[in-house]
Image: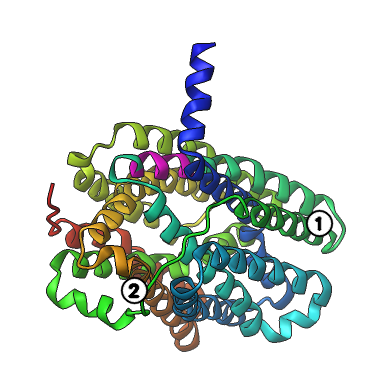
Amino acid sequence: MNRWKRIVLHIRTHRQLFLLLAIGGLYALSIALSNTFVNVYVWKKVNSFHALGIYNLAIVTWQPLAFIVAGKIAKKIDRVIVLRMGVTFLALFFLVVLFSGDRAMNHLFLLGGLLGIGYGFYWLAFNVLTFEITEPDTRDLFNGLLGAMTSVAGMIGPPLAGWVIASSEKFTGYMAIFLSSLCLFIAAVVCSFFVHRRQSAGRFMLQRAYAERKKNKNWRMITNAHFFQGFREGTFVFIVSIFLFMATGTEKALGVFGFVNAIVSFITYSLASKYIKQRWRLHAILFGGVLLYASVFLLVFDLSYFKLIVYGALIAIGYPILLVPYLSLTFDVIGQSNHAKEWRIEYIVVRELFLNGGRAVSVLLFLLAITLFDAKEAIPLLMLIVGAGHFIIYFFVRRIRLSR
């Protein structure tokens, strides 16, 4: 009984932290249900790498613009409202897909823009709230718990969605999954009403926060690292799911891939949040980066479904080992930067500009490669280039020196 009392007391003490985790969990489940399958849905409708690239380019170009607008709103009004706006835009994306059907495929850049705006508003608010609600001694725990929840969502979402889609006629399964995602986003909005409103004073000083890169070496290194993080993510976020579908011809295979990835990721996140201490952060980031780059070689030579499953398991080990210390390090750098309290929103926006800048460059290289060369030959070579992004991160973060 005493144990349960301690747990209840702990939840009450850190109520805002657990509310933020709940919102993150609902978001993760919604994305787990639909995100992998949205790209396959677009692919099945248009059957074109070029159109798929345009759709994803829209996401990564609208997203940084949304971050800037969201930052201004968060500075003048409230970031909890920005969080609700982000989830609302994401819900609107699914409403458009549900009710416009094939007509949406004629406006892929605008469709991707809705998703990009939603991501921008949501992640600006979520990251700022994470910075404000967590402390240096709770950030590794928070990131670990959030990662574990994301993994659990991955165990449930993709297998369920894959089974529903594959068992349904034509595109009715997709509509059911997109409707489920819409409902989960609505639930996240409801949870946001219990998060304390957090206003910020002062002007939106984005240029000042960017200019700090000249004075603050730590800030310059972490933003450079985020560019290369995005450099890999821009292409890999959609091409792997298309490879899976092309190799098997069924959405169930994507569900199996998602389940294997999620269960391994859940175990790794649980261990990473418990055992990766501050003094081991750099070693963990290097190991995770090496593992993530090594996994790319499974995709470029004699691709098979078995190799794709192994790839899913390897990245499920690599990502938690890299991201748990890397995200905590990022917030620690921001926390020790000049005017961190007044400019915390601006620092988050600048970080996201570099992250999405890397993603945009990656997708543009993808479009250039498939335009100039044969897609079957160009894509594997491109993956070897952009796939090094997480490995390169280490060579920037190793130069960061935090004060105790």
Disc 2 to disc 1, how far (Cα)? Answer: 37 Å
Q: Where is residue 34 in the image (x, y as percent from the top left)?
A: 67, 58
Query: What stretch of residues is rendered in magenta?
Result: 139-147
- Secondary structure found at label 2: helix
Check the image and report above or below for 133 versus 90.
above
359 inside magenta stretch = no
Whether residue 343 is visible to the viewer of this picture, yes or no, is: yes
Residue at image location 44% in from the left, 44% down from the top? 316
Q: Magenta residues: mostly which secondary structure?
A: helix
Q: What residue type is labelled 1?
A: Ala
Does residue 261 show up?
Answer: no
* Mark 2 vs mark 1: in front: 2
Q: Disc 1 on helix, strand or loop? A: helix
Above or below, 235 against 302 in this view is below
Mark 1 highlights which residue? 176
Which x, y percent locates residue 284? 25, 44
In the picture, the disc for residue 350 is 2
Residue 370, how many percent across, how many down? 49, 82
Q: In the rendered structure, are the residues bearing label 2 and label 1 in contact, judged by CB atoms less than 8 Å apart?
A: no
Q: Nearer the viewer, residue 133 or 371?
A: 133
Mark 2 Cα-neighbour bin, 10 Å: few <14, some 14–19, many ≥20: some
Q: Is residue 215 left or right of residue 245?
A: left
Horizontal relation, residue 150 to residue 329: left or right? right
**Image quarter of the N terminus:** top right
| Amino acid identity at mark 2 | Val
**x and y, in percent, of residue 180 in the image:** 75, 54
Of all residues shown, which one is farthest toward the right? 169
* Residue under the point 36% across and 76% down: 202
Dot 1 crowding, Cα within 10 Å, few <14, some 14–19, many 20+: some
Decide which of tag 2 and tag 1 comes sooner along the chain. 1
